[in-house]
Amino acid sequence: MTTETPDLDWAPSACTLPTPERPLRVAEFDALFAASLRRVERLAPTRLRLALAETGDIRATAEDLTARETACCSFFSFALRPGNDGELLLDTEVPASQVAVLDALAARASAVLG
């Protein structure tokens, strides 16, 4: 799936993921969003909630992906919890200094929804 989104060079200097692997990680987030994203909610400048359809192995995929993302970008805080109507809520928080990264993630997710 191709979406019009910001360029891939939004990873901050705090990210330890090797540069050649960054497009692959972005593609993993895009695939998660394409498979299950229902809505995007900006709770605060530093907080984002993604509502995912909890089908198949989405929970395991989201847990694995967010754990790997936190390992390379330790400023991210991810929390998964059940929502209503078969939803899985993925809450993401960053410090104020990393709002641009959260903005980019929100833009990628929103692009999937159209």
Image: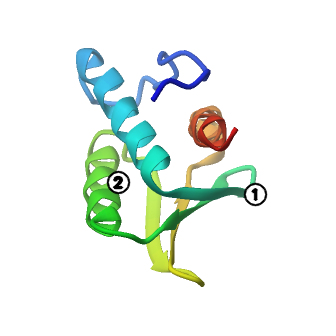
Image quadrant in which the C terminus is located: top right
Pointers 2 and 1 in contact (C-beta within 8 Å):
no
Which quadrant would residue 14 be assigned to in this image?
A: top left
Q: Which residue is mark 1?
A: 44
Residue 16 appears left or right of 80: left
Residue 32 appears left or right of 43: left
Q: Nearer the viewer, residue 75 or 4?
A: 4
Name the residue located 38 percent from the left edge and 70 percent from the top edge. 55
Q: Nearer the viewer, residue 55 or 99?
A: 55
Q: Which residue is mark 2?
A: 66
Name the residue located 45 percent from the left edge and 29 percent from the top edge. 1
In the rendering, at what x and y percent does residue 106 appear?
Answer: 63, 42
Q: Is residue 3 above or below residue 19?
A: below
In the rendering, at what x and y percent does residue 43 appear?
Answer: 74, 61
Residue 73 appears left or right of 112: left
Number of other residues with Cα within 10 Å of mark 1, as a class: few under 14, some 14 to 19, many 20 or more: few
Q: Nearer the viewer, residue 23 or 33?
A: 33
Q: Secondary structure at mark 1?
A: strand
Which quadrant would residue 56 be assigned to in this image?
A: bottom left
Q: Is residue 97 above or below residue 56?
A: above
Give amino acid for label 2: Thr
Q: Is residue 60 visible?
A: yes
Number of other residues with Cα within 10 Å of mark 2, as a class: few under 14, some 14 to 19, many 20 or more: many
In the rendering, at what x and y percent does residue 17 appear?
Answer: 27, 29
Label 2 vs label 1, nearer the camera: 2
Q: Is residue 48 visible?
A: no
Name the residue located 59 percent from the left edge and 48 percent from the top edge. 95
Name the residue located 28 percent from the left edge and 30 percent from the top edge. 16
